[in-house]
Amino acid sequence: MRGLRPAIFESISRRRSELLTGEGVVGGRLKEVSHQQSDFERPMQQAKSSSEPATTADPAATLISVPPFDLARYLRERTGVIERQLAISIAESDGPANRLVEAMRYSLMAGGKRLRPILALAACEAVGGQIEPAIGYACALEMIHTYSLVHDDLPCMDDDDLRRGRPTNHKVFGEAIATLAGDGLLTDAFGLFARSAKAAGIPAELVVDTIAELADACGSAGMVGGQVIDLLAEGQPLTQLELEQLHSKKTGALFVASVCGGARLGGAEPAQLQALQKYARALGLAFQVTDDLLDVEQTTERLGKRSQKDHERGKATYPSILGIERSRAMAHELADHARDALAGFDGRAEPLRMLAGFAVERKL
Ligand code: GRG
């Protein structure tokens, strides 16, 4: 495989891996809120340990001396959990399907922010759940997301050569295998979730509800439907509302399924699910507006995928409708709306609050 990786791809991959481990992407504004000593597992409003001498006579001062949440560390840790589980999620095969498995693993293990699984686990914790039973669901989300990228890159769709800092799947394995690798990732995702949920003893009704929601999010009413609208709209002017409707299906629905599915597996109450749905809708749109901005403002090398492509393909985007500055303001407002939706949650929702900021501050 290495013979197929020219130097430019090696350099893109190296830079991306630095960014994804928190060395670059959480720079700037996000880094200001990250401190080495903090620990996301610690209760958010924890007072100082009784073994430490008090440094002030004001008891309230000890209550607010909580180390800020360390997002970079949190992302590194959670990415590690997901990478390890993904690596064993697709069984090696010696048979005729070996090439297919290779192609599936090629795109799945190519890095990526792993944002959807991280959101699912964060939502699970936000409602007081343990993450272990939800890890299978988190991996299924990443497999589905990866399938959508593989298919989106095909010549009959966006026709891209570069993804996650590597040549796209069809450039390496050919169109037929790339198509089937996407099919395999999508289908196996549901099998993986069903089996992991059974092994974890999750009640069947919860599993069925989660599968139904996930299938709706990726199917004709969700991601696939959104992709069709996107393809048919190429070269056409869209209103802001039409663009929002397109993205709520194409990218937003999977964010909602990630957050709500993770929360449901964590034992969420209906009112919590409602609030988290609001959070995920706002976050999903904020993510998409930011994606449009990155396409205009970042280089191909930095993104690990082709930039400036929306304009080339005649696609309506937030910057093309609203301009750069209004789009950026809109992304930040949406992140605020997402955080507002969490008003009724305690410190266990802090990762979700921080992830709303990450969705708009990210640099890839
Ligand atoms: C069903 C063929 C098919 C497509 C569905 C989601 C989608 C439509 C296509 C993906 C292409 C795309 C560029 C969508 C815009 C937003 C998006 C999903 C960006 C990529 O997601 P990130 O930034 O990627 O989370 P990483 O690589 O970090 O996982």
Image (cartoon, grey):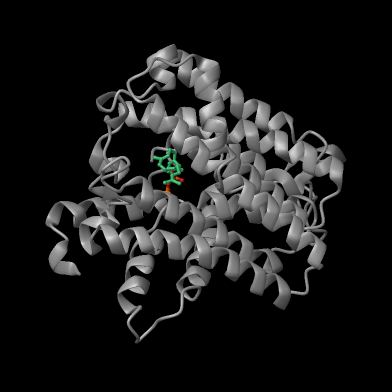
Q: Nearer the viewer, residue 102 or 87?
A: 102
Image vertical order of residue 13 relative to residue 295, above or below: below
Q: Quadrant of residue 41?
A: bottom right
Quadrant that contains the C terminus: top left
Using the rendered image of the protein, determine whether residue 216 is visible from the camera's viewpoint: yes
The image shows a total of numbered marks equal to 0
Q: Is residue 289 left or right of residue 172?
A: right
Residue 176, percent across and down? Answer: 28, 61
Q: Residue at x 54, y 24 (%)?
A: 244
Q: Quadrant of the N terminus?
A: bottom left
Q: Nearer the viewer, residue 62 or 12?
A: 12
x, y percentage for residue 358? 53, 39
Furthest residue toward bottom:
94
Ligand 1 location (quadrant)? top left
Residue nearest the observer in this picture, 45 or 221 = 221
The residue located at (55%, 50%) in the rendering is: 116
Residue 113 in the figure: left or right of residue 162: right
Q: Which of 53 and 182 is in front in this view?
A: 182
| Rendered residue at 71%/78% (across/down) | 199
Establish if 81 lies above or below 168.
below
On screen, residue 78 versus residue 26, left or right, reads right
Observer able to see residue 76: no
Identify the residue at image location x=79%, y=62%: 51
Residue 35 position within the rendered picture, expressed as x and y whole percent measured from the top left: 55, 47
